[in-house]
Amino acid sequence: MLVWALFLVACVASGQSEDLTKYVRTDTGSIDGGNTFPGVTWPLGMVKLGPDLENGADSYSGYQPNGNFTGFSMLHESGTGGAPKYGVVSQLPLIGSITNPLDNLHDTRASPDVTEVGYYRSSLGSGIVVELAARTRGGLYRYTFPNGTMDRNIVVDVSHVLPSYRGQGLGQNYLGGQIDIKEDDEQIHYEGYGIYDNGWNRAAPWRVYFCGYFDTPVAYQTFLSDGRTSDVLVEYGNKTTYESAEARLGAVFFVKNTVVQSRVGVSFISSEQACRNIQEQIPAGTSLETVRDMTKSAWNTDVLSKFTTTDTNETMKTQLYTAMYFTSLLPTNKTGENPLWESSEPYYDDIFTFWDTFRCTTSLLHVLQPEAYEEFIRSLIDVWRHEGYVSDARSSNWNGAVQGGSNSDNVMADAFVKGVRGKIDWNDGFAAMVKNAEVTPPNDDDSRDPSGSVKEGRGALPDWIEHGFITPNFTRSVSRAIEYAANDFALSQVAHGLDNATAAAKYLVRSRNWRNQWNPNMTALGHTGFLGPRDLDDFLDQDPMSCGGCYWGDYYYQGLPWEYSFNAHHDIAEIVSLVGGRDRFIDRLEKLFTPGLIDGNAQFGNTMFNPGNEPSFGTPYLYNFVNRQDLSVRRSRHVAKSYYRPTPDGLPGNSDAGAMESWLLWNMIGLYPLTGQTTFLIGSPWFQDLTIHLAEGKELHISSSGGSEERFYVQSMKVNGEDWNKSWLAWADVFENGGTMEFVLGDIPTNWTTGPLPPSPASEGRYM
Ligand SMILES: *[C@@H]1O[C@H](CO)[C@@H](O)[C@H](O)[C@H]1NC(C)=O
Ligand SMILES: *[C@@H]1O[C@H](CO)[C@@H](O)[C@H](O)[C@H]1NC(C)=O
Ligand SMILES: *[C@@H]1O[C@H](CO)[C@@H](O)[C@H](O)[C@H]1NC(C)=O
Ligand SMILES: *[C@@H]1O[C@H](CO)[C@@H](O)[C@H](O)[C@H]1NC(C)=O
Ligand SMILES: *[C@@H]1O[C@H](CO)[C@@H](O)[C@H](O)[C@H]1NC(C)=O
Ligand SMILES: *[C@@H]1O[C@H](CO)[C@@H](O)[C@H](O)[C@H]1NC(C)=O
Ligand SMILES: *[C@@H]1O[C@H](CO)[C@@H](O)[C@H](O)[C@H]1NC(C)=O
Ligand SMILES: *[C@@H]1O[C@H](CO)[C@@H](O)[C@H](O)[C@H]1NC(C)=O
Ligand SMILES: *[C@@H]1O[C@H](CO)[C@@H](O)[C@H](O)[C@H]1NC(C)=O
Ligand SMILES: *[C@@H]1O[C@H](CO)[C@@H](O)[C@H](O)[C@H]1NC(C)=O
């Protein structure tokens, strides 16, 4: 008996320390437009060390499956589109005599790269093997040069940055920098900084500092060009320092050994801090394997172990843990690395963007990493304190770009209504939201939108406040109107919770103004009434099944009128009424999923529904609002199972900083969050058993019986042991104190949702 008991204890102990990183496929979504970052990083880590490849197209995360290596650099984004950002603080190993280090240096790829959590390896055409590991403020390179070669070099080109080929003027620029070679402790190291600007958010010039060490003796030559983009050398020799706002500069290090490690620290504050960062995080003598194992451990502890299952289906577990990984790459925790102001508040950056992440990602970050989430909200409010606005997006310490509404409002309301308090000053939080809702930001003269700010706030606010709708005097007038309405609903929620009845009532009224944009005459496929463009007196002609260019200058940004007309998630009962009632609402939803109705979206069967774009995220679940939960399950399951795979081409679109992966995770959990409300719509869980480990040791247990790939319709369910007949539940039911959800699944749809419909707070005139 005793032996058996000890054995059990050992099993439990080893179960707790199970290495879940083995289920993470770090190359998922890295090709075919997923744009994910396959290199090494920590949860929300500032440093993302990975390869930069050049194949004539934009390398958003640095990575490409083909093309040539131009460097291995410290800062990247993941899953973004628009135009590349970062790809700075680079090294490139090369063999042979380098006559001009400014001359388009590159190497080919000998075999596909190898990636796992905490480790990356590239084999170059020259025979050099590059291995990478990283911590949050610095990284470790290990180079293995082929035996028998002479002239082993590592090139540090401070002007290295990811270029853009899209021709929209969004390419990053190198603007100058510094490099210093220092010899202390018998060891040569280099320090300095680079200055860059632009990229998708048209950032002002920003500066990143670096500090690099080698673990074996090196000789060096520094170099300087005669201009910022020039490959003409003016100096190439043993000078120990260059600083220039005019010229490319850097150093070539000549290494003696065939195996050499380099540790590079990064900072946004100073090169001293970059040196301190690397000495603290990866001290001299640390092996790459040690750093790799620390990274795996951090991923297990901070993220992956938050979900556990006794299910054994490897494919499903791979999808689960891979999706968790990719939802936790951005934003980045840059606390202590804010160069702009002194503050005791945390500092987070690389919000890319709330337009993408407010629906599913931030609500998941709350569940997975509650401490980081509270810090993140505090950091948003601190940006408002010092810069005046919490923007929809931010990167390289610069607000922008805003594609629609001020969706940070939705995120803040979500945190507020779900009880996130801690050290958050919610009076300031609400003031930041009021700023978005009341003060038009100055026009930043971005060519994408001549009519107003793309940097922050709500550019079309003058019309929204004066008329309660948006005229074509402002671009994206219709999609912004529906987003502004949701943003105003977010304000009403927080105002209500702060006992500010006047503001709560005011913004609840404003949250209904999307209705002013409803054109009762727009008609297609037997349906009448859609969100449409209008001027002061009249609606303008508009096809509900077309969004024209669907871009910055159009009425609708990246979504069809048909899709946007479902997007007042705080006012769904009103939509049901406007479209002619329950059956018409269902038919309208069904049309979205009907193949062949439009010319676009060929990869999704020419459906109006686009699983690869965020305005469609909530739509498959809206059947719950008319008690057809079975159809929500059918449609959302189909999307999840058809368009997501744990493979490099396994995403339906750009990951968008983990937005896609977080949608998938909620589908696996069997819930869909309505951000800004406490409501979750109920779907159908994938696992027989899934435990979500919440804050303070609380747990949510989700179980299902009778399910399989074909048997996914909910037959009945219990919440916290009680029979449940609603197609929704609230945060307090299962998250606040933990809880249980027990599903019975089967292959035939049943009408188990006989209880009250999900709330439509703006329709019903209440707060959630
Ligand atoms: C990669 O480099 C090789 C050798 O320099 C060159 O022939 C080839 O054109 C390059 N490929 C691309 C996509 O730049
Ligand atoms: C290079 O030579 C060393 C010493 O002879 C040997 O240990 C190592 O395996 C060789 N490396 C390669 C890549 O062949
Ligand atoms: C100085 O440069 C020469 C090549 O011009 C090189 O051989 C030598 O090793 C360099 N010295 C140092 C200290 O890097
Ligand atoms: C495991 O899950 C995958 C993906 O959902 C599914 O295709 C497969 O049939 C499952 N395997 C078993 C044995 O249930
Ligand atoms: C964010 O970074 C700071 C500074 O390194 C650290 O103290 C804090 O714990 C980090 N937050 C989380 C949630 O890891
Ligand atoms: C649109 O802009 C024009 C030109 O500035 C102005 O005359 C007109 O009043 C504006 N329309 C509205 C609805 O504000
Ligand atoms: C309520 O909110 C409004 C902003 O809409 C603000 O001006 C006012 O001071 C607030 N009232 C109270 C009592 O906090
Ligand atoms: C809808 O069309 C009818 C008939 O043409 C017209 O009388 C009505 O004014 C239109 N309504 C709107 C809001 O444009
Ligand atoms: C559920 O009941 C409604 C009527 O309330 C009916 O329209 C619908 O077809 C039923 N659904 C199923 C799956 O039986
Ligand atoms: C739904 O469940 C509630 C709570 O158990 C119960 O009071 C109510 O009668 C049920 N409604 C229906 C229509 O079964």
Image: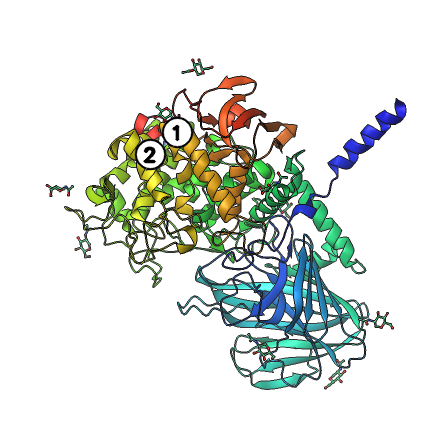
Q: Which residue is mark 1?
A: 628
Cβ of mark 2 under 8 Å from ligand 9: the answer is: no
Q: For the residue labelled by badge 2, is the local secondary structure a helix, a strand or a loop?
A: helix
Viewer-proximal residue, 588 or 279? 588
Cβ of mark 1 under 8 Å from ligand 9: the answer is: yes
Q: Is residue 753 left or right of residue 194?
A: left
Residue 262, x across and y down, in percent: 73, 66
Residue 515, x across and y down, in percent: 25, 38
Q: CA distance from mark 2 to mark 1?
A: 8 Å
Residue 413, x across and y down, in percent: 44, 36
Task: State which image quarter holds ligand 10.
Answer: top left
Q: Residues within 10 Å of mark 1 (few under 14, many from 20)?
A: many
Q: Quadrant of the C terminus?
A: top left
Q: Is residue 596 left or right of residue 716?
A: left
Quadrant of the rendered structure where residue 520 is?
top left
Instruction: Identify which residue is drawn at 59% across, 82% down.
Output: 103
Q: For the residue labelled by badge 1, is the local secondary structure a helix, a strand or a loop?
A: loop
Asked if the residue at tag 1 contacts the one at tag 2, i.e. Cβ–Cβ closer than 8 Å, the answer is: yes
In the rendering, which numbered label is found on residue 756? none
Q: N-terminal of the two: label 2 or label 1?
A: 2
Q: Which residue is mark 2?
A: 586
Viewer-proximal residue, 282 or 752? 752
Q: Is residue 428 left or right of residue 476?
A: right
Does residue 659 appear anywhere in the picture? no
Q: Would you place residue 574 above or below residue 530 in this image?
A: above
